[in-house]
Amino acid sequence: MYFLLFYDIFISTNISGSEKTKEMGRRKAKNKIKNWIISLIVLIFLGATGYYGIDYIDSSRAKITSSLSIENSNLIDFNNDKLNIMFFYVGQADSTFIKLNDFTMLIDAGNNEDGTKIVEFLKEKGVNELDYLVATHADEDHIGGIDDIIKEIDSIGELFIPTIGSSGNDYKNAIKEANDKGVVIENPVRGDTFYLGDAKCEIMSALEDEDVSDNDSSIVIEMTYNKTSYLFMGDAGKKVESSRQWNRVDVLKVGHHGSNSSSTDDFLKQVKPQYSVIEVGKNNSYNLPNSKAISRLESAGSKILRTDKADGENPGSFLFTSDGNTIDIKEISITLDGNS
Ligand SMILES: [Zn+2]
């Protein structure tokens, strides 16, 4: 818009310069001054309203507010008609719970020691059924607690699990519990879609090549709820990130605990997350999150939330609540780390 305005001024200036007669020249000079004044008024107006252009770009994104106060876990109530996403602190591991009305999904269940802690918390909050239980991949810090979830939660709709890593003990334990309980087991593939209430979920990746690593076999899920969108990466790295085009999302669950092998510049240029959540253990031996990955996320303009320093210092969880247009973030002092 500014460009057009200056173009206008430029054109009017040139036209007046080409006039021959004094009479016409005077009239044109008056017009020229008039044009300049009108342009100046418009420019001042645009400046005073905070520049219409920027406002316009922002209005296409979900508005996100974050509450600075630390909430007591007793105050958490999932019985609302909003989308609730809780990123648990489970030490050096992942677990994310999602609820929309009566529909529920748990993505990963931390290490072996974390499963019962997650169950205890969910039951305390009145969650006795899961429509979807997702083991993003076969590494213990994601699949370890899955068997306890299946055993102790009353009803599980479907278990999503990749085909890679099936020889591992934690994977076998999860499958055994699912079979004992008669849970439907699915190996989702890229492009599959399903709904959690009104929230649309799409499998963005689930690599099955024989030479693919456990991390890159991660089931990656994009969730869209009205104007808001979320991308859960599991431990997917650059191989997955470069395997397709990505949509812009509001919230990114960062791949592989903020490792340098995930969150590449090309990927972040597409995803442009407003907020990035890193589930990571305090003082973990892998020295995660990696400082280069953090820099790339910051350069992409994303605000970073880390479960190891949820309040800036201590571990904790994050609860995102959305009505589909806006997202509110609360830091919760709860930890479900069975190894601490
Ligand atoms: Zn992991």
Image (cartoon, rainbow, N blue to C red):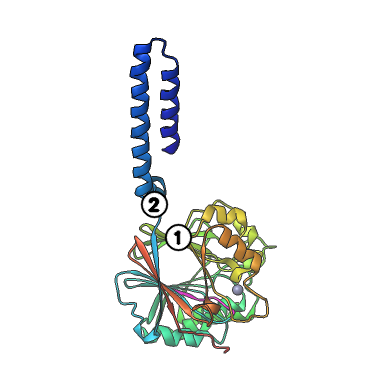
Q: Is residue 10 left or right of residue 285?
A: left
Tell me the quarter of the image containing the N terminus.
top left
Tell me the quarter of the image containing the C terminus.
bottom right
Image x and y of residue 215, in percent: 63, 68
Q: Residue at x 44, y 30 (%)?
A: 7
Q: Nearer the viewer, residue 304 or 86?
A: 304
The circle on residue 250 is 1
Q: Nearer the viewer, residue 82 or 111?
A: 82
**Highlighted magenta segment, given as a residue range:** 92-97
Q: Nearer the viewer, residue 76 or 141?
A: 76
Relative to 223, say whether 29 is above or below.
above
Q: Is residue 282 left or right of residue 134?
A: right
Specify the farthest residue to the top: 21
Q: Amino acid at mark 1?
A: Asp
Marks 1/2: CA distance? Answer: 11 Å
Q: Quadrant of residue 140?
A: bottom right
Relative to 190, say whether 181 is above or below.
below
Q: Is residue 264 magenta?
A: no
Which is more N-terminal, label 2 or label 1? 2
Q: Amino acid at mark 2?
A: Ser
Q: Describe the element under mark 1 as helix, strand or loop.
A: loop
Main secondary structure along the magenta-highlighted residues:
loop
Q: Describe the element under mark 2 as helix, strand or loop.
A: loop
Q: In this view of the protein, can residue 207 be seen by the observer?
A: no
Which residue has dot 2 on it? 60
Q: Nearer the viewer, residue 87 or 68?
A: 68
Q: Residue at x 42, y 10 (%)?
A: 20
Q: Quadrant of residue 328?
A: bottom left
Q: Quadrant of ligand 1?
A: bottom right
